[in-house]
Every structure is written in structure tokens, then in C-alpha cells.
Amino acid sequence: MSELFENYGAVLIAVPVGIMLVLTALLATKLLAPQRRTALKGQVYECGMLPIGRNWAQVHVRYYTYALLFLVFDVEVVFLVPWAVSFLGLIEADAGKVILWQMVLFIGTLLIALAYAWRKGVFDWQRN
């Protein structure tokens, strides 16, 4: 049991240090950044050229849905690949059945999300 707490010692030290670094960077940005607003600073940037027309463009909500689906599959791969690599070693440690069912539950949850998105018509590639 003491080994478990020894492994988390570095995490318990790193979390406050990380939070402190982020807060320090945010405070330094607030104090050191120029605060004056100018017309040139508020102008839209288009690859060094002067902007033509209005700077407002409508983005369809479908693109956000695609981004969320990409994240779902990306997270699945991030968790599934290391699990698959170490699974044989975990079976030998007598924890194989529990770990297998945990992964089945995880993949099942993702399949439910996929079925929901499919039912809502997210994968229909027709133009409206």
C-alpha cells in the first residue's frame, strides 16, 4: 500500500506547481501586456492583406458535431492502444477479467454515443 502513495507523491507535488505556473503566467500577461486599443489592432488579419468585405462568417453547427465525434474516437484510441499493448501482462497478474470488462464497458459507452449520433443523422453527408 505504501508503494501506491509513493507513486502519487510526484503528482501531489506537480499539481500545485503547475497551477502556480499557470497563474503566474496569467498574472504576468495581465500586468505586462499593452492595454491600448487601436483601430489597426482590432482589424481582422488575413495573411497580411487588407480584409475585403465583412469579417463575419457563419459556421454551421455540423462542423462542431464532427469535431466532437473526432474527439470521441481520438479518446477511444488514446485509451485503447496502451490497454491493448499491456493486456497480456495484465492477464498474468490475475486482474485480466476485471480489466477486460472495464474496457468492454468503455467501448460499450462509446458505441452508445456512436449509435446516438448515427440515429440523429450526423453521418448523413447531404447538403441542406
Image (cartoon, helix red, strand yellow):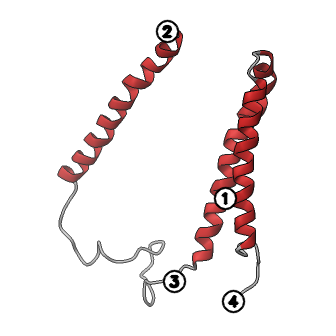
Measured along the vertical axis of the image, is residue 27 above or below residue 55?
Answer: above
Residue under the image location 57 percent in, 76 percent down: 61
Which residue is tagged 1?
70
Classify residue 50 as left or right of residue 102: left
Q: Indicate which disc, 3 or 4, sits on the residue closer to the N terminus.
A: 3
Q: Indicate which disc, 1 or 4, sits on the residue closer to the N terminus.
A: 1
Give how far across and how far down residue 12 sits, in percent: 39, 24
Instruction: Report, in whole angstroms, how far the alpha carbon at label 2 lies from the one at label 4.
Output: 60 Å
> Regarding mark 4 in the picture, which secondary structure is present there?
loop
Classify residue 121 as left or right of residue 40: right
Q: Indicate which disc, 3 or 1, sits on the residue closer to the N terminus.
A: 3
Q: Nearer the viewer, residue 105 or 37?
A: 105
Q: Is there CB contact under 8 Å for labels 3 and 4?
A: no
Instruction: Report, in whole angstroms, how far the alpha carbon at label 1 lies from the one at label 2.
Output: 40 Å
Q: Is there CB contact under 8 Å for labels 1 and 4?
A: no
> Regarding mark 3 in the picture, which secondary structure is present there?
loop
Residue under the image location 80 percent in, 21 percent down: 91
Q: Indicate which disc, 1 or 2, sits on the residue closer to the N terminus.
A: 2
